[in-house]
């Protein structure tokens, strides 16, 4: 299955509508979709009357998004970490599953803020501890945590970004209006996963070349134990949180997918 098709399948497992319902969307409002991928979420915002400009560094994904010709949407290839002057001021910024690629997120958010009109909003969704599923052996959990630490130290990816969104937004000068914990059929659920979800996780492990290198001879064991964990009746992944605070500059909403409860 091509990567674009995998992304399209995964979109059906997300809870984006739960966040859309909380946002102050207006007909004709301009929304920047940071890290738009194949444009599925841009399309949903477009059907709600927003004028969406989707931005992504992956030209292949941008071409896929453009070919679908969703209403009220346009797409541009650009580096989210070094955006050019876009010539617009948006009413909102939407960012889903892109924040973890920027370990200096606070600094980046300050740059993004220049594209917001006064009183605009920003909504960010990210996974908190991608590998935080139970039950896993101590050795497998340790290897996955060490790999996440190595990725963060190398400024490649922050696997625990979801739990840091509120801090990053506050440091960037935003007031967090709401924090939502979202269910997800692939990333945040209780009990055994559906067979197609297990396949999706298997493909994700196949793409993780650096994880394979990090785990070396133990990679196959780690992968198979993790996949087995997903199929078990006692599988668990949950944490609930909802916060609100006064507005200072612009509304910000942080959505994070559930993480493991530590015993």
Image (cartoon, grey):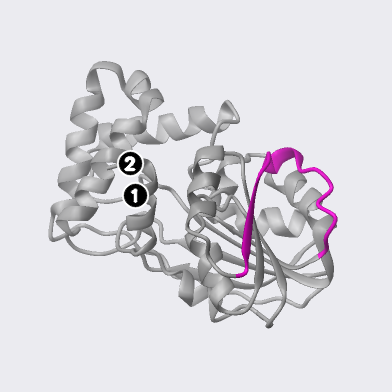
Q: Residue, x 62% and y 69% (percent of image)?
A: 72
Classify the position of the N terminus by image quarter: top left
Could you tell me residue 109's position as x and y percent? 74, 52
- Residue designated by label 2: 2
Q: Is residue 35 left or right of residue 224?
A: right
Residues in magenta? 72-89
Magenta run includes residue 79: yes
- Residue designated by label 1: 5
- In this picture, is 170 found above or below 144? below
From where the camera sits, is residue 16 visible?
Answer: yes
177 or 19: nearer the eye?
19
Q: Is residue 1 left or right of residue 100?
A: left
Which image quadrant is residue 125 in? bottom right
Which image quadrant is residue 170 in? bottom right
Classify the position of the C terminus by image quarter: bottom left
Magenta run includes residue 35: no
Q: Residues within 10 Å of mark 1 (few under 14, many from 20)?
A: few
61 or 234: nearer the eye?
61
At mark 2, the secondary structure is loop
Q: Which circle marks residue 232 in the picture?
A: none
- In this picture, is 79 found above or below 29? above
Could you tell me residue 8's position as x and y percent? 37, 56
57 or 206: nearer the eye?
57
Q: Residues within 10 Å of mark 2 (few under 14, many from 20)?
A: few
Q: Residue, x 51% and y 57% (percent of image)?
A: 39
Q: Is residue 212 left or right of residue 41?
A: left
From where the camera sits, is residue 187 visible?
Answer: no
- Asked if the residue at tag 1 contacts the one at tag 2, i.e. Cβ–Cβ closer than 8 Å, the answer is yes
């Amino acid at each position: 299955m091509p990567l674009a098709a995998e992304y399209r399948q995964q979109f059906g497992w997300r809870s984006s509508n739960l966040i859309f319902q909380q946002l102050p969307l207006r007909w004709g409002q301009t929304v920047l979709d940071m890290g738009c991928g194949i444009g599925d979420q841009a399309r949903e915002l477009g059907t709600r009357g927003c004028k969406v400009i989707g931005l992504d560094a992956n030209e292949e994904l941008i071409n896929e998004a453009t070919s679908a010709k969703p209403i009220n949407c346009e797409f541009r290839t650009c580096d989210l970490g070094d955006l050019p002057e876009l010539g617009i001021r948006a009413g909102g910024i939407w960012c889903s599953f892109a924040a973890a690629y920027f370990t200096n997120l606070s600094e980046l958010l300050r740059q993004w803020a220049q594209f917001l009109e006064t009183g605009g909003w920003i909504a960010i969704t990210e996974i908190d501890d991608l590998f935080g599923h139970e039950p896993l052996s101590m050795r497998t959990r340790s290897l996955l945590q060490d790999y996440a630490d190595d990725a963060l130290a190398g400024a490649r990816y922050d696997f625990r970004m979801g739990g840091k969104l509120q801090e990053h937004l506050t440091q960037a000068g935003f007031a967090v209006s709401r924090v939502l914990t979202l269910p997800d059929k692939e990333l945040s659920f209780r009990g055994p996963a559906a067979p197609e979800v297990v396949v999706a996780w298997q493909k994700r492990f196949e793409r993780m070349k650096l994880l394979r290198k990090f785990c070396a001879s133990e990679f196959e064991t780690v992968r198979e134990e993790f996949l087995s964990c997903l199929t078990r009746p006692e599988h668990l992944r949950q944490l609930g949180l909802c916060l609100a605070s006064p507005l200072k500059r612009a509304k910000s909403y942080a959505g994070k997918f559930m993480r493991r409860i530590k015993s």
